Image (tube, helix red, strand yellow):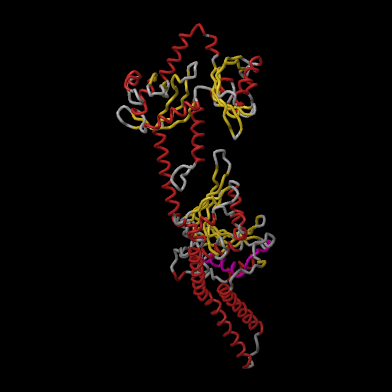
């Protein structure tokens, strides 16, 4: 449990710690330990299970004392349990016959006293299997020797002390724990435990007082001196041994060195404080939600992000974020619900409205389910970093990239317009000569004039398409989707490039029966133009320059492949070619949108672009698009 604001453990944490220590001791105990309430075992340690041939799980909440007691002995056992639970006797020690899971009858010695559990009467105690003792009364000496062996070789310290502080019995483990060479040296050296061994003398009086009052003491922690003056932390479990008159004869019990455990706890507290300092000073917002979506912890960075200031913790702790209308409206509530169901998530540049709904921002959001010991989700760890400036900067850079690409496109387009304009001028002059001849009554060659005018019209429309694409890309804010015939569009792009002059062989495979693509016509034309021009640049200077353009169809997806036998893409930059601002070309060769913007434009049309390349053997670009029946988000 974390410390409270006063730096001290809360009463609840103390109770939890005591219960943990009790369970730890019980599970390591050599005796069976049980708790009975309403005629059912509410707790049984592993040793008790082994005594009766069961696992502890098979006993707890499933069996009662009657299930483990020989029928003839049940009336007596039932009477003793009833008397203790009713408070008629505080504690009692007696023997009875038990029945193991296998049906074998065993002898049991039980010790217990009345208590309360969950506010209601209960019985807690210990028991031992004394079958062998009963069967071997004649071998009492051997049994005592066996006990002595256990006493001498036990890992835990075992002691017997008087109320006035004398040690009357100690095993070697206890002597070693306290720094003595032997139990005999320990017994002869210690005459007043309270003043000689206890770091705080008054603690010994507390120990004695609790034992005399309760008869049994479990999990009593204190600090003791060793022979050389070093201090150690120990935990003791003890009981009172009384004579027939009820007077205290001595206290006996076990003692365990928990110094390393205490150091580990101190280190853990220090680590928790260190982690808390990291979280409190982290530049990103870190907070937790419980399984119902309520805030359970927040750090200062969240105060800044939420705009709530220093009172953010006061306002957010206990607030249900799942029910916040702004969280629901932006869609974040759905992701949080998934996280609380055990599915981690991470969102990048997520559009988000602040807690009070007064500011729109962008965030990176990571949600990590917090699981308990049983594997169930108990909450959600959330980490938020505001990325509003990054999104704005990236948008600005993308716009700059777009405008730069359009600028390069304009320069390239001007270069590409030279061919149709030259043709247009030449045939316009030829048409003028024909008309001039007609004026001189030399006759009118109408066929030749019609051919010239048709060619002039074709070249003029080619120029118009190039200029229209430039205007569309620079003016419109979004895409305009329509059904696009790929064969017609691609042929138009290829006709605008004079492959013959460049010494490039062009091969195409453009089936006319493909379904129409659902795309923006001008944007798609410039994407294809860019990819084809990349191929042209790649094969420049090759005597066997070759470019292949193919289209295909699979399911609801159309594919366009542009393959060249050029220089290829080096492995070192293959994963960067679609990044903004990345290029290996000279500025004068820039043409079209650029691969980064191509990728963005295709993504807006639910399409993709990728490349496969081997240096020295060529590159193939693969473009995919949905058909007119697949649908796109507009």
Q: Please give left or right for residue 504 compared with residue 65 in the image.
A: left
Q: Is residue 83 left or right of residue 21?
A: right
**Quadrant of the image containing the C terminus:** bottom right
Is 518 magenta? The answer is yes
Is any part of residue 578 visible from this angle?
Answer: no
Magenta highlight: main SS = helix
Res. 237 visible in picture: yes
Residue nearer the viewer, 240 or 404: 240
Tell me where residue 552 appears, x and y as whole percent: 63, 58
Q: Nearer the viewer, residue 293 or 504?
A: 293
Q: How many marks?
A: 0
Tell me if residue 518 comes above or below residue 53 in the rendering: below
Percent x, y for residue 616? 46, 56
Does residue 369 show up magenta in the picture? no
* Range drawn in magenta: 514-534
Q: Position of residue 555 (x, y in %)?
A: 67, 55
Residue 154 location, quadrant = top left
């Amino acid at each position: 449990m974390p410390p409270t604001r006063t730096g001290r453990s809360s009463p609840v944490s103390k109770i939890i710690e005591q219960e943990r220590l009790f369970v730890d001791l019980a599970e390591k105990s050599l005796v069976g330990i049980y708790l009975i309430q309403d005629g059912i075992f509410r707790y049984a340690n592993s040793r008790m299970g082994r005594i009766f041939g069961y696992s502890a799980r098979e006993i707890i909440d499933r069996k009662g004392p009657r299930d483990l007691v020989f029928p003839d002995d049940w009336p007596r056992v039932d009477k003793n349990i009833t008397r203790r639970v009713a408070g008629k006797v505080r504690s009692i020690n007696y023997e009875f016959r038990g029945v193991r899971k296998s049906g074998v009858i065993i002898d049991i010695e039980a010790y217990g006293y009345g208590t309360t559990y969950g506010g209601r009467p209960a019985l807690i105690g210990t028991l031992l299997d004394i079958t062998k003792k009963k069967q071997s009364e004649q071998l009492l000496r051997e049994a005592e020797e066996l006990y002595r062996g256990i006493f001498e070789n036990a890992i835990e310290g075992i002691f017997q002390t008087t109320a006035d502080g004398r040690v009357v019995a100690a095993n070697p483990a206890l002597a070693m724990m306290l720094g003595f060479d032997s139990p005999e040296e320990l017994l002869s050296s210690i005459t007043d435990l309270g003043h000689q061994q206890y770091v705080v003398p008054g603690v010994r009086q507390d120990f004695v007082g609790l034992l005399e009052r309760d008869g049994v003491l479990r999990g009593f922690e204190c600090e003791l001196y060793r022979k050389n003056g070093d201090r150690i932390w120990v935990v003791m479990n003890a009981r009172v041994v009384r004579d027939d008159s009820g007077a205290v004869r001595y206290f006996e019990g076990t003692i365990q060195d928990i110094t390393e455990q205490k150091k580990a706890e101190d280190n853990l507290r220090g680590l928790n404080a260190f982690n808390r300092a990291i979280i409190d000073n982290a530049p990103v917002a870190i907070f937790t939600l419980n399984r119902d979506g309520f805030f359970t912890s927040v750090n200062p960075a969240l105060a800044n992000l939420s705009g709530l200031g220093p009172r953010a913790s006061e306002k957010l702790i206990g607030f249900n974020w799942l029910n916040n209308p702004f969280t629901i409206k932006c869609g974040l509530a759905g992701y949080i619900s998934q996280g609380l169901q055990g599915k981690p998530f991470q969102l990048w540049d997520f559009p988000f409205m602040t807690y009070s709904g007064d500011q729109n921002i962008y965030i990176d959001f990571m949600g990590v389910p917090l699981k308990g010991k049983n594997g169930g989700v108990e909450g959600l760890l959330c980490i938020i970093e505001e990325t509003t400036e990054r999104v704005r900067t990236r948008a600005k850079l993308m716009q700059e990239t777009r405008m730069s690409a359009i600028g390069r496109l304009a320069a390239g387009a001007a270069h590409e317009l030279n061919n149709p304009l030259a043709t247009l001028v030449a045939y316009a002059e030829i048409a003028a000569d024909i008309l001039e001849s007609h004026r001189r009554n030399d006759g009118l060659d109408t066929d030749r004039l019609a051919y010239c005018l048709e060619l002039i019209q074709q070249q003029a429309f080619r120029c118009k398409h190039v200029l229209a694409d430039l205007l569309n890309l620079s003016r419109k804010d979004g895409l305009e989707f329509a059904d696009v015939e790929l064969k017609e569009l691609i042929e138009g792009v290829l006709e605008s490039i004079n492959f013959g002059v460049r010494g490039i062989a062009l091969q195409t495979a453009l089936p006319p029966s493909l379904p129409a693509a659902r795309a923006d016509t001008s944007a798609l034309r410039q994407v294809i133009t860019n990819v084809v021009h990349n191929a042209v640049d790649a094969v420049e200077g090759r005597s066997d320059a070759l470019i292949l353009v193919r289209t295909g169809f699979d399911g609801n997806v159309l594919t366009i492949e542009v393959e060249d036998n050029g220089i290829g893409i080096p492995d070192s930059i293959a994963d960067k070619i679609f990044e903004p601002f990345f290029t290996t070309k000279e500025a004068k060769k820039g043409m079209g949108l650029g691969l980064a913007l191509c990728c963005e434009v295709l993504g807006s049309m639910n399409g993709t672009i990728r490349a496969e390349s081997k240096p020295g053997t060529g590159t193939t670009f693969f473009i995919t698009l949905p058909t007119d029946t697949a649908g796109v988000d507009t």
